[in-house]
Structures are given as structure tokens and as C-alpha cells.
Image (tube, rainbow, N blue to C red):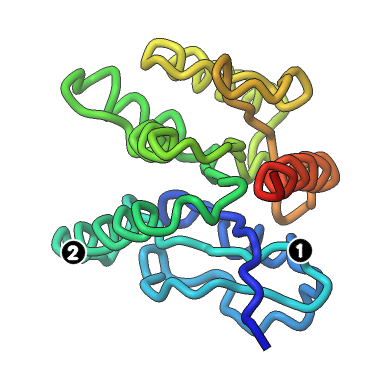
Amino acid sequence: MAHVLHPRLLIIGNANTGKSTITKLLLSNPSGYKGKIGKTPGSTLLIKPIHQEDMQYEIVDLPGFGFAKKSSHRREEHIKKQTISHIEKHHRRYFLGLVVINILRIEDELEKYFYKKKQTIPLSFELITFLLEFAIPLIILINKVDKVSVFDKRRIITYFVNTARQYGLNLVHLDDFGYDYAQALPYLEFSALKKTNLGDLKQALYYVLRNYQEAQDK
């Protein structure tokens, strides 16, 4: 029997953003998933697609890079090269990419790599820009919003969106996104722990998946 090639969902982001927990939330049978949750930051090296029965797609939780406390520079570069190589080879299989960002890291990252050092690029922006080169539809998931107050959440996200626009990325909230990737990129506040906006994420995911499948069938 021929092996079915399922469309792939890419989950990617710097280390310690909650990618593994989000992966589990998007499986058809989360309790049946035996993968590790809460790995040591920067420890993911194995790229192995995850698929369960009754799933129309498979998930790839790609190695994060940056903010790995115990990771050497050489190891970080190895992880980064592995990630880039994988995307270059398999990007056509991905119907959607979720770029996961830890809201607790946003201010430090932008201050350090955008405002203080004009010649550097924040890792989040570098990652987004790289994926856009391969025309993978993206949703920017700003995770761990349960860890900050409502006031701080609004302030940090506004700061992130405004800085992204200075960099050349036009981010709009998923609710206001018309699925025109030539005009903007959608973002969504999220909490993997509290499952905040999980329903909105799944709705958008399946919408993009249908469009991908229809395009493949033509």
C-alpha cells in the first residue's frame, strides 16, 4: 500500500516558547502522544513528523534556536543550519507555519537586537523573514499571555507590532486578517496552558488547510 503524504503543519520558534505543548493541543489524541513536553531549552534536535489517526495533517515541531541557556554557540549554529536545511528541502509540504513567540521575551529581544544594536536582527524577525521566502503561510502565535496582566499584554503586543512594522513586517490580528498574505501577517494572543484562543487557532488552521488541499487538487 502506498504511503500517504499528509500536508504538514510547521511549529517553529526560539527555545522555551511552548512549542511542544502547542503541538500536543493540536493532535487528534493528545493523551496518546508520548513525546516529551517541557524539554530543556534548545534540546530538540530530531526532526520527526507526528501523525495520529483521524488527523488530516502531520505536525513537525522544529528545533528552536536562541535563548538556550546551556547550549554552546557551535550547538546553536548546528541547530540553526539543520532547521534551514529542512525548510529548504521540504517547504512545499507545509500548508501552514506557526511561529511561536514567548511574550515574556519580546521586550528584551527587541531592545537588545533592534533598538540598541541597529546592525543585528531579532531572532523572531529573522525566522519570520526566512519562512516568508518560501511562501509558507504563517500565523504568529504570541504564547504565554496568561503570565502577564491585561495591561502588559496590550503594551507588549503593541510594541511588538510597531517594531515589526519598522522592520518591514505588517502584522494584523487574526480577527482582522483577510488571508491576503501579500498585504499582512496574522498574529494571535495565545496561552497553551490555559488554551486561550485555541478554537480560533484551529478554525484558521483548517481554513488554510482546505485552501492548500484545493490548490493541490487542481
Q: Quadrant of the N terminus?
A: bottom right
The amino acid at mark 1 is: Gln
Residue bearing the label numbered 2? 72
Contact between marks 1 and 2 (CB within 8 A): the answer is no
Viewer-closest of 137 and 213: 213
Viewer-closest of 135 and 172: 135
The amino acid at mark 2 is: Ser
Q: Residues within 10 Å of mark 1 (few under 14, many from 20)?
A: few
Q: Position of residue 71 (x, y in %)?
A: 25, 65
Q: Position of residue 123 (x, y in %)?
A: 34, 38
Residue furthest out toward the front:
218
Q: Quadrant of residue 145?
A: top right
Viewer-closest of 133 and 31: 133
Q: Residue at x 28, y 17 (%)?
A: 115
Viewer-closest of 133 and 117: 133
Asked if 110 appears above or below 136 in the picture, the reply is above
Q: Does residue 80 appear to the left or right of 34 in the view shown?
A: left
Asked if 54 appears above or below 84 in the picture, the reply is below
Residue bearing the label numbered 1? 56
Q: Quadrant of residue 187?
A: top right
Q: Does residue 49 appear to the left or right of 127 in the view shown?
A: right
Q: Does residue 31 appear to the left or right of 101 in the view shown?
A: right
Q: Residue at x 40, y 15 (%)?
A: 168
**Residue 64 seen anywhere in this rendered image of the structure:** yes
Secondary element under disc 2, as helix, strand or loop, is loop
Q: Residues within 10 Å of mark 2 (few under 14, many from 20)?
A: few
Residue furthest out toward the bottom:
1
Asked if 47 appears above or below 10 in the picture, the reply is below
Q: Residue at x 69, y 44 (%)?
A: 218
Q: Nearer the viewer, mark 1 or mark 2?
A: 1
Distance between the Cα atoms at labels 1 and 2? 38 Å
**Residue 146 seen anywhere in this rendered image of the structure:** no
